[in-house]
Each structure stands twice: as structure tokens, then as C-alpha cells.
């Protein structure tokens, strides 16, 4: 689960990571208070759940009250489009106002989940900021990292190795080691998949400052963190993804026009691969899961069908814990609203009972016997 920058910075501050003084603004009445507390210049930052805000105009520096009002009027309540957002952009319902920091250097630091190593990985970069991805591509020697053994945690020597790689002033060794240790504590204790500071600045007093903060929490661990679950902001998510979450479904909106429905993440991935092999593109990823009920199936199909990008729905169900007759009953419940063509592969437990339920439905349903036939049907579609 993504959270906003201002929320991530509250977590950072609780772990003694220094962030610029600031507060969240949600109404114009707070502008004068912000100016009196922070003083000019003030950094105005749109709070949305995608990157690229700087290039997209979502980060401004206001030197006067007039510039502060202009920044507020141009950002607050508007949709901000960045190179990483959907075409319609993200709604800006909060702005973070921060005291301007005089900085002498920008770095990059993050802890990510390295799935190949099955361990956290601490990454440090000699440069930070909006071009960090390009920097890595053009000059990978500017980045170094350390895999962290979770049995022992982040070892001091690992932080030191990255410190010397960054070629920092020796006086910063202890603060840098402490910063790395605090980030690792956040990563472990909050159960993150990403904890990132970009840029990590050194200000003119020689202090590390988290100019930006990005934290992504593991959805599967949120039940252990009810306080963090409350940070979820539905305005930043696709409305269909939010609705699917309400019914316990795993749904992700994609950019194609073939709606994909399967049971189990692996089968859903294979289904999308099949769609791509046919030359088409998936419009979504919907995993109804092994324990889906009739209601969950009906609602999942309704959500997929309601996507205007979807021109055909491809259903790939292998009955196991979710029996084929249960799926068929949910499909029958949803059939009243289904007008788009459906290609369905149904196999596994109680498939005969499922087929009987589907037999008399008056909808554009094509049942295929296997994935080879499904591939040929998908190839033949003119969409």
C-alpha cells in the first residue's frame, strides 16, 4: 500500500530521521499561517501517489505570498498528470508546505525487497533527485548496494562500505550509519517493500535531510498494522481497484482491452501471458482467489465488465478449492449485466455441474475445451 509523502515523513521523524519542517494544507485559510510559521521561500508539494511530480509541475517554490496563493490555486483540487500517472492524472487533495533547505549535495538511499535474494537490499547513490533512474541506466557505477541478512540485520560494516563509496566527509560517518540503521528499523518494523529517500540531502549545516520520502507497505502484512491501514487514501487509487478490494478481490487495472478473470495469481499471470501471445493486451488482472463465493464472482465480473476499455472477457478457471459449479453460479448471477463477448475455459472439480449451469444462458458465451483453443479464439478477435 502506498502512502503519501507527508505520512512517510511522520514515520521517519518517529525514527529520528530529520525532515524539513512543514505541515499539510487542505484549505486556503491556512496559507498565511504557513507563511508565518515557515517563512519564505516555501516548498509546495502536491501529495499524490505517483512519481514525477517535479517534472509534472507538482513541486513549486514560492518566494512571496502571491506566489504561494498561485501555487495553491493551480494545484489544490486539480488533477496532476505526470509521466508516471494515468492519462487523467491524480487528484491533489492535500498539499505539503515545507521550509526551504539550503543544500550542498543530493544523494539517493533506499531499502528495497530483493525478491531474487529473498532479502532486503540497502542501496546508495552518489546522486539523487528526479533523474535518478536515468542516472542508473547511464552510469551504474554511481550506485552501490548491500544485501541484508535478516538473521543479523543491517551490520555496521555494511553501512560503512556504502559511506566510503559515497565519498562523504568523515564527520558524517556516525550520522550516516545511524540513518541507515533507522531506515532498516522502519523497513522491518512497518513491514515495507520499499523505504526510500530521494533526494537525501546534506544541508548547509552538514546535516542529513530527507527532502522526499517514499514508503510502500506490504498489503499482506497490514492486518498487523491497523494504524498504518488507516493511512489508505482511496482517492489515489483506481476506483475499480478500491471496489474490488472491498469484495476481497485482487484487481489491477491495465492498459489493454481484454478483460482477464482467473482463480489464483499464477493462473492469472499465465492467462495474461496467453492474451499477449495472441497479440492482444490485458485490460486488467482479476484473481478471484481460491475461496471465492458466488457474490465475489458476480461482483468481480461486474467490475471487469464495467470497464469501458474491455471489449471481450477471457475467463480461465481451473476448479480446485473454488469449484467449477460455484464459479458457474456466480457467473450466472452476473449474466444479467453481461453484454460483451465472453471466452471461457472451465476445467477441474465439478466441471460437469458447472457446464450444466452455463448451458442455457442467453449471453455471447464461447466455451473452449483447452488453452490452445482459447488462444486461437483470442487471435481471431477483431478488437
Image (cartoon, helix red, strand yellow):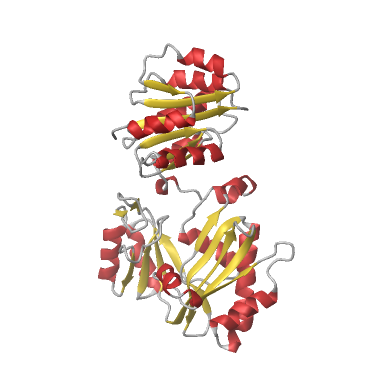
> Which residue extends farthest right?
151
Q: Is residue 48 left or right of residue 328?
A: left
Q: Is residue 87 left or right of residue 290?
A: left
Compared with 266, 12 (above or below) is below
Q: For residue 113, which quarter of the picture?
A: bottom right
Task: List x then y, in percent, for residue 163.
Answer: 59, 80
Number of marks drawn: 0
Q: State the residue at coordinates (50%, 20%).
A: 328
Q: State the residue at coordinates (63%, 60%).
A: 117
Task: List x then y, in percent, for residue 302.
Answer: 41, 28
Q: For residue 326, which quarter of the picture?
A: top right
**57 or 280, which lies in front?**
280
Quadrant of the frame with the C terminus:
top left
Compared with 271, 35 (above or below) is below
Q: State the residue at coordinates (48%, 73%).
A: 140
Task: List x then y, in percent, for residue 239.
Answer: 40, 40
Q: For residue 104, which quarter of the picture?
A: bottom left
Q: State the residue at coordinates (55%, 85%).
A: 168
**322 or 210, which lies in front?**
322
Task: List x then y, in percent, for residue 309.
Answer: 32, 37
Is residue 305 at least partly visible in the picture? no
Q: Is residue 235 left or right of residue 187?
A: left
Is residue 188 at least partly visible in the picture? yes
Amino acid at each position: 500500500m502506498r502512502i503519501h509523502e507527508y505520512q512517510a515523513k511522520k514515520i521517519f521523524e518517529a525514527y529520528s530521521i530529520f525532515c524539513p519542517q512543514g505541515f499539510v494544507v487542505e484549505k486556503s485559510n491556512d496559507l498565511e499561517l504557513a507563511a508565518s510559521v515557515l517563512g519564505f521561500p516555501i516548498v509546495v508539494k502536491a501529495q499524490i501517489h505517483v512519481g514525477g511530480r517535479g517534472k509534472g509541475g507538482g513541486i513549486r517554490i514560492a518566494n512571496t505570498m502571491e506566489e504561494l496563493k498561485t501555487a495553491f490555486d493551480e494545484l489544490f483540487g486539480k488533477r496532476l498528470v505526470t509521466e508516471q500517472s494515468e492519462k487523467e492524472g491524480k487528484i491533489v487533495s492535500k498539499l505539503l508546505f515545507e521550509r526551504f533547505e539550503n543544500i550542498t549535495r543530493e544523494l539517493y538511499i533506499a531499502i528495497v525487497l530483493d525478491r531474487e535474494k529473498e532479502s532486503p537490499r540497502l542501496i546508495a547513490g552518489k546522486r539523487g533527485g528526479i533523474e535518478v533512474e536515468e542516472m542508473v541506466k547511464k552510469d551504474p557505477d554511481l550506485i552501490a548496494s548491500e544485501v541484508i541478512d535478516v538473521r543479523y540485520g543491517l551490520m555496521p560494516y555494511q553501512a560503512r562500505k556504502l559511506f566510503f563509496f559515497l565519498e562523504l566527509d568523515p564527520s558524517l560517518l556516525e550520522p550516516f550509519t545511524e540513518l541507515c540503521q533507522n531506515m532498516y528499523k522502519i523497513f522491518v518494523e512497518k513491514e515495507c517493500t520499499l523505504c526510500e529517500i530521494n533526494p537525501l540531502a546534506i544541508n548547509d549545516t552538514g546535516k542529513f535531510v530527507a527532502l522526499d520520502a517514499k514508503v510502500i507497505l506490504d498489503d499482506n502484512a497490514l492486518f498487523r498494522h491497523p494504524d498504518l491501514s488507516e493511512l489508505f487514501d482511496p482517492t489515489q487509487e483506481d476506483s475499480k481497484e478500491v471496489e474490488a478490494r472491498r469484495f476481497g478481490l485482487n484487481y489491477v487495472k491495465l492498459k489493454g482491452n481484454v478483460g482477464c478473470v482467473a482463480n489464483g495469481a499464477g493462473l492469472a499471470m499465465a492467462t495474461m501471458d496467453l492474451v499477449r501471445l495472441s497479440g492482444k493486451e490485458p485490460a486488467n488482472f482479476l484473481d478471484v482467489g481460491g475461496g471465492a463465493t458466488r457474490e465475489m464472482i458476480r461482483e468481480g465480473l461486474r467490475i471487469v465488465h464495467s470497464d469501458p476499455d474491455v471489449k471481450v472477457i477471457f475467463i480461465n478457471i481451473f476448479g480446485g478449492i473454488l469449484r467449477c459449479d460455484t464459479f458457474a453460479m456466480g457467473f450466472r448471477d452476473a449474466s444479467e449485466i453481461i453484454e460483451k463477448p465472453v471466452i471461457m475455459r472451465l476445467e477441474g472439480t465439478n466441471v460437469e455441474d458447472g457446464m450444466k449451469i452455463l448451458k442455457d444462458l442467453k449471453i455471447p458465451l464461447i466455451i473452449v475445451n483447452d488453452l490452445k483453443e482459447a488462444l486461437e479464439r483470442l487471435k481471431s478477435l477483431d478488437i
